Amino acid sequence: WAYASLYLPSAASSERPRDRLAHVVAFFVAGLHLAAVSYPHFPWVVWSPGAGKFSAALPDDTKIRLDLGAGAGAPSASSARRATFEVVGRSGSGFRITGADETICRAEGCGSLCFCDRGVTTVELGPGARRLKFTMPELVARPSAWRFGRGSVYDWRGSAHILDESSGFSCSL
């Protein structure tokens, strides 16, 4: 979300679908390194329902609302973690981002953790509410010196898919 104000106003003002898609792809790729460190869903941490509701405003007055909670049913270490979010650009910026994620974390060899995100993010652009949707690839986090944090290695595995619903243009990364 940190790069929304940099790329999405240009996407909103783009008349050509290819240009619009290119700006949204740039927004998506620019934020991958920040998305990697924002996965707090360790399998041994049990969240209670409604575990957190947060809101913030970025320096350019972009508003963010985030609601974190456990998956359906009784919370457990193997539960999917759910989050819903909304990002609204400053007045006149022409973008709004919404989504719902369901993330499952599983342990893999050599102490790695794999985060599987089964959500869709929607980017609405401009007064005609042109919509683009994207999905995230899996993230594998490998510890450095058997610890997570500085020096950890983050690998994206699989594909991200971005679709401009109004034009039918799409991109897979």
Image (cartoon, grey):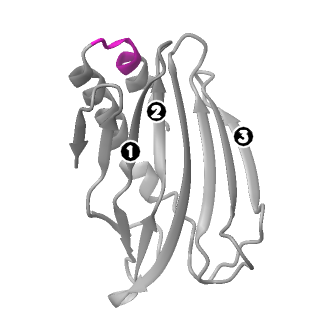
Label 2 sits on a secondary structure element that is strand
Which of disc 3 and disc 2 is earlier in sequence? 3
The residue identified by callout 3 is: 55
Relative image position of residue 41 (x, y in whole percent): 57, 70
Label 3 sits on a secondary structure element that is strand
Discs 2/3, front = 2
Discs 3/1, front = 1
* Residue 124 as seen in the image, left or right of residue 16: right
- In the picture as drawn, the residue positioned furthest to the bottom comes out as 109
The residue identified by callout 2 is: 123
Residue occupying image coordinates x 32% and y 14%: 14
* Residue 42 as seen in the image, left or right of residue 21: right
Relative image position of residue 50 (x, y in whole percent): 78, 61
Relative image position of residue 87 (x, y in whole percent): 59, 34
Q: Which residue is at the front of the view, 156 or 127?
A: 127
Q: Which residue is at the front of the view, 145 or 77?
A: 77
Q: CA distance from mark 1 to mark 2?
A: 8 Å
Tell me the crowding category of disc 3: few under 14, some 14 to 19, or many 20 or more residues within 10 angstroms, Cα based: few
Tell me the crowding category of disc 2: few under 14, some 14 to 19, or many 20 or more residues within 10 angstroms, Cα based: many
Residue occupying image coordinates x 62% and y 61%: 82
Q: CA distance from mark 2 to mark 3?
A: 19 Å
The residue identified by callout 1 is: 134
- Tell me which segment is drawn in magenta: 10-15
Q: Which residue is at the front of the view, 150 or 127?
A: 127
Tell me the crowding category of disc 1: few under 14, some 14 to 19, or many 20 or more residues within 10 angstroms, Cα based: many
Can you say whether 149 is above or below 124 in the image?
below
Give the overall secondary structure of the magenta segment.
Answer: helix
